[in-house]
Every structure is written in C-alpha cells, then in structure tokens.
Amino acid sequence: VSFLRRSKFEEGGMMEVSASNNVSLREFGCEQNLLSRPDGSASFVQGDTSVMAGVYGPAEVKVSKEIYDRATLEVLLQPKVGPAGVREQSQEQCVRETCEAALLLSLHPRSSLTLILQVLHDDGSLLSCCLNAACMALMDAGLSMSCLFCGVTCAIGADGDIIADPTAAQEKESRALMTFAIDSTERRVMMSSTKGSFSVQELQECVAVSQKASEKVFQFYRDSVRRRYSKNL
Amino acid sequence: MAAGFKTAEPLEYHRSFLKENCRPDGRELSEFRSTTLNIGSISTADGSALVKLGNTTIICGIKAELTNPTVDAPGKGYIVPNVDLPPLCSSRFRPGPPGEQAQAASQFIADIIESSEVIKKEDLCIGRGKLCWVLYCDIMCLDYDGNILDACVVALLAALKTTQLPEVTINKETSAPEVNFEKKHKLNIHRHPVSVSFCIFDDSILIVDPTAEEESLSTARLTVVMDEEDQLCSLHKPGGTPLSGEKLQECIKRATARKGEIHKLIEKVIKSMKTAQ
C-alpha cells in the first residue's frame, strides 16, 4: 500500500501530475490456458481477489444478434454466490465495451465471441481484476487486438491518500473509489467507473496513479507470457 | 439527394458536418439542445417533473411510502430509483422485462444518489429502527432521442426539490404512526448534481448532448456528473475508444458551465410556480 504525496496540479496538464514512483500493487498472479474446453482461458489473481475467464469464439452467432460487419461480443460475469444482478450487468457492460474497443472485431464479421468471467474470490478491486483476466484470456485465445488493456482501481481514503489496488477493507473505508481501464499504446483512459465524490484534482491524481500502475501491470503481462512460452518452446 | 445520402451513409453524412464544426441539427459541437422543465406535472405524486431535452422527454414521479428501516441501517430511510424505457419511446425497445440499457440507467441513477448524497438518508428516518420513508423515484422515458441520462438527472433533481412530505409522528402509547397532512415540509436537498454526456466520434471529435443517431454512430460515450461545489460525483465511461487527459479536461470544463445553467433553470421554474400559486 502506498501513500502518495500530493503534487501540485498545473492547468491543462493532466499528464504532468506526477505520482511518486513507488505505486505499489498487491502480489499479482496469472495462469493462461488452464481450461481445456474454451478457446482461450486465464485466471488472474490480485492479492486475495481472484477471477477466472474463458473465451469462446469466433463461433456461429444467433441470427438476432448478428452484426453484418463485425463480431458480436457477449460478456457474462458470474458472481461467487447467487445469480448476477443489476450491478454485475453494469460491470459486464463496462468490460464488454472495453474489449470491443481493443479487439479488431471487423476481422470476424457475422460471428460470436463469448467471454465468461467467474469471480472466485472478491477482496477488493474486483472490476480491475476482471478486466485483467479478460485481457489475458483474449490474448490466450489468439484474437487480434489493436492494443492491450489493464484495469486499475484507486481508492481515496478519508484523509485524501490515494491507494492503488485496494483490498475490500480499504474500499470500505474509502471516500471515493475509481476504476480505470488503461490502454497499452498511449496509456489513455478507455473505461472509467467511479463511486463516491471527489474533486477534479483528485481525479487527475488518480488517473496519473493508474497510468503509473498500468506500466507495472503491462510489465507483469509481458513477464507472465514470456514465462509461459519459455516453458513451451 | 441529401435525404438519400443520410440513409445510405449515415456516418459519412455526420462526418461531413463535423468537418465544418457543426452538426446536422445546426448545433455547435459543445452546444446542448434547448432544455425545458415543468414541475408538479403529476398531481397525484408527492413530487414530479417533466424534462425535455430537444425531443428527448423524461418524466419523473416520486412516491413516498412509510416502511420499516432495514436491520443493518436502522437510522436510515431509503431511495429506490427506477428508469423505465417503454416501447412507446422508441422502436429499439421491446415490451417485457427491462433491457440492458434501462438497467444500466437505473444503476447509474442509483450510483449518483449514493455518491452525491443528494438527500441524506438519515433525513428520511422518522423513528430509529421503527419507521422511515422510502422514496420511489420512477423515471420514465416518453420520447427517446439520445442522452437520457442527462435528462433523467435533471428530472430527478427537480422532482426531489418539489417533493413535500407530510409530518409523521409516532404515537407513544399505541406506537402507531400518525400522519398530519395539514403540515407538509420540503425535502432537504444537500447537493445538486448535474450530469453532462458526451460522445466521441471517429476516436477524436468530442460532441456534447448526442441525439439517438449520434449515439449509435459514436465510438465511445462519457458522462460527467458534477455538483454545485465543483465536486465530481461520477465519471462514467463504459469503455469505447480511449480518451486523452486533455479531452477529459475539456469535458470537465463544459460540465462546469452546464451545471450553472441547469441550477438557474430549476430555480427559475420553481420561482415561477410559486408566483403562479
């Protein structure tokens, strides 16, 4: 857990808000291609938060969902217990539209892609863990993408400290909670979902922290894929 | 000819306007459609408002009921928002259980109520652990022409501002609630969130207050919710093409200007209702 020094905000220069270098995230873990049936699968662990993802496709699409010039992507988010509710639906929407922007769906017209996310354990930063698992599973399925993406959650504590990748306890104590999806090419914000109220400056600091943290996540992606293929080849 | 072009190549049609920094309906890129507000439209509701944003029409009614507080929050009442997109408002909606968009909108409104603390839930409590108010905020779209979120938030805020609740006391002997309809009081509105929605066209052009057609052709959507003290209550971007920091700054700037306009509009309408009575 890192407590970041507040830096002075300069007009118009969101990128210049510099978070101190030691953005610390919890221990990450990832395993790809662990299921035999899906075309791509991955499990992603952030501390005690754990999500498993499976991708099916490109496959045949239902006529009612067919899009003539690109693939139809469907995202299903299964909670640990009980049926999916309205909150899961809105998270599904966030993950789906992020994946749609990253995937080159026009390569597979009139076909369907299904991404299933199964929550194994939720200890905070669930949406960002879902995004990371989704990206790893899409990568494993070998689908063409214009860029990779990762999810980062930031919590603003009662005293204004920004905590990246918070646990459930830290989320509960926080005044505001933000989750961003960051793209790998220019570190821009693909998705944003927030809870609680915060100032413009706090938002900019959180975006800066997330961009910083995204570098670590992308480095983890790279290491994890490298490790996998060094074993196989 | 122009009509045929619009039907055959809708994206090219819009691009040709955007290239000249304007839009097919004559607006500039950062211009809202004209917003009109009517309050107290439903006489049987405890509070209501009708908002028109260009063609988009949203009506919001608030019904207050007495209930028991939940066990885990004995000192709080609760608010239940619901957004309905009936088949009446657009051909894209079918009858039956609420679709994904309606559910996402309901969740968005619930999140804003939660994040902004428009109403302190403690204010809705009458007797701790015994009695509280539940506010059902039913928001219905009558005409769908894009940007329902902004219209919903204005309708909700105006309806809450006009809501009057009767005084309720708990009889000490029988512990039964006694409602005094003679004495009504207004809800205490703590903060005034205003939502501003944008669409991104061709990964780079930012337009405000999109119509239904612009929404379906855009590559990403973004909604900023800000209150009167420049605090953000929500920055909702459900995916789509990435957005740079500078563009985000632009959106926040536009939202700052817009929230003033909406607050003035609501004040003006409430004032004119008072003088009319």
Image (tube, coloured by chain):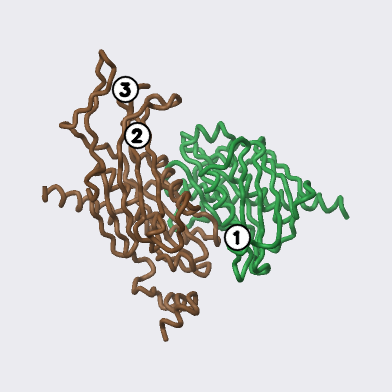
Crowd band around label 2 with a 10 angstrom C-alpha radius: few (<14), some (14–19), many (20+): many
Q: Is residue A166 above or below residue A113?
A: above
- x then y, percent, for residue A9: 46, 50
Is residue B43 toward the left or the right of residue A148 in the image? left
Label 1: which residue? A100
Residue at 63%, 41% (x, y): give it.
A24
Query: On what subunit does the disc labeled 1 rest?
Result: A
How far across and how far down the image is residue B94, in percent?
A: 46, 58
- Letter of the chain shown brown in the rendering: B
Q: Position of residue B5 (x, y in %)?
A: 46, 82
Q: How much space separates mark 3 and mark 2, taking CA atoms?
A: 13 Å
Q: Is residue A189 visible?
A: no
Can you say which quadrant of the picture contains the N terminus of chain B? bottom left
Depth check, mark 3 against mark 1: the one in front is: 3
Residue A1 location in percent, x, y?
A: 60, 36
What amino acid does circle 1 point to? Glu
| Residue that sits furthest to the front in the current view | B95
**Which chain contains the residue that carries disc 2?**
B
> In the drawing, what numbered circle is on residue B127?
3
Q: Which of A153 and A77 lies nearest the eye of the viewer?
A: A77
> What is the three-letter code of the residue carrying label 2?
Val
Which residue bears the numbered disc 2?
A: B134
The answer to whether tags 3 and 2 share a subunit is yes
Please rate how many residues cluster around mark 3, counting C-alpha atoms within 10 Å: few if below 14, some from 14 to 19, many from 20: some
Instruction: Look at the numbered disc 1 and give the secondary structure of its residue.
Output: helix
State the green chain.
A
User: Of circles 2 and 1, which is in front?
Assistant: 2
Say which of B234 and A207 sits in front.
Answer: B234
